Amino acid sequence: MSSISTSSTSSASATSSPASQRKAGRPLRSRRRVEPIFYFFLVPSLVLFTLAITVPGIIGIFFSFTDSIGIGDWDFIGITNYIAIFSDPAILQSYLFTFGFSIVTVIAVNLVAFLLAVGLTARIRMKTALRTVFVIPMVVSGIIIAYVFNFLFSNSLPAAGAAAGIPWLENSLLANPDLAWIAVVLVTAWQAVPGALLIYIAGLLAVPEDVYEAAGIDGAGKFQQLTKITLPLVAGYVVINVILGFKGFLNAFDIIVGLTNGGPGTSTRSIAMTVIAGFNGGDYAYQMANATIFFVVAILISLLQLSLTRGRNAL
């Protein structure tokens, strides 16, 4: 009995609170010291990011409230630039095209990438070699891809259409203001599919094989397994691909420049192209206001991403 009371007393003293330890004069365990190497890597990166990104961004936001053309004297004009943007049809057209193009491309990329991932994780021959082939577009520069497809849409396909007697194929898709956006979507999706494909393959390989075996024993077919098991288990990966893809397509620039250069007219001009064209045309403050609005939109999309992925253990 005495041994029990002695052990209870010793365990109670071992688990005493920090306050009682301070009163008893016993030192508390110090917090873990940060290694100097941590600051060696952090500080230079932080300084470079601040000087290259943060400071220019703050300066640009300030000049969005002026009439500056990028050089020379300027006057403070308040929110005049912001008011003018919301009544500028060229700016509104660029936002309409960018968001519409982004939504359509996200749907196309994720649909194709998911179906390819399902096929490349199935029990087929040469799946490793096929994965390598499908990933190749991701490592090619976007501007090179755009120039190659520009030649195909402008020369090869019209020539093939004329030879085959197909009237609608004889004219370049890039010359049609109503259809040029389709070419932009096709080329952008062709380059973006591999990145989404890799994420989906990782998600599908993380699904336990026992789940499919149990479903097969219960009589579930391949389509039922796809819709009732695969899709729910990789939902987190779908969310990540959709959000990352949408944010990336909002910044579309190089493929559009090489493919259509914003044309015909301004039918395929993105927000990024509009901002840069304004910088080159002397509308520095006006386009900085446009860029600031676009920055706020990107922040809102990032907050949406956080709200959708919070609590998901996708990766």
Image (spheres, grey):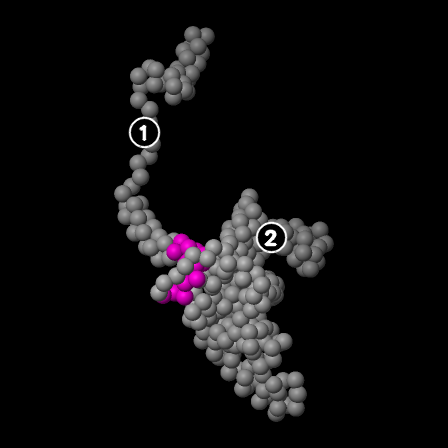
Count of labels shown? Answer: 2
- Quadrant where the N terminus sits is top left
Frontmost residue, 29 versus 54: 54
Label 1 or label 2, whichever comes before in sequence order = 1
- Residue on which disc 1 sits: 30
| Residue drawn 35% across the image and 52% down it | 50
Q: Using residue 280 as the reference point, say whether residue 45 is left or right of it.
A: left
Residue 25, visible in the rendered structure: yes
Choose top left, top right, bottom left or bottom right for residue 168: bottom right
Q: Amino acid at mark 2?
A: Ala
On residue 193, the disc is: none
| Residue drawn 51% across the image and 54% down it | 296
Alpha-carbon distance for marks 1 and 2?
A: 43 Å
| Residue drawn 38% across the image and 16% down it | 20
Where is 161 relative to 115, above or below? below
Q: Amino acid at mark 1?
A: Ser
Where is 232 relative to 122, above or below? above
Where is 208 relative to 256, above or below? above
| Residue drawn 60% across the image and 73% down it | 182
Dot 2 crowding, Cα within 10 Å, few <14, some 14–19, many 20+:
some
Q: Position of residue 135 (x, y in %)?
A: 49, 68
On residue 235, the disc is: 2
Where is 132 relative to 151, above or below? above
Reply yes or no: does residue 60 show up in magenta.
Answer: yes
Q: Position of residue 163 (x, y in %)?
A: 61, 92
Tell me the magenta residue range.
58-71
Frontmost residue, 109 versus 65: 65
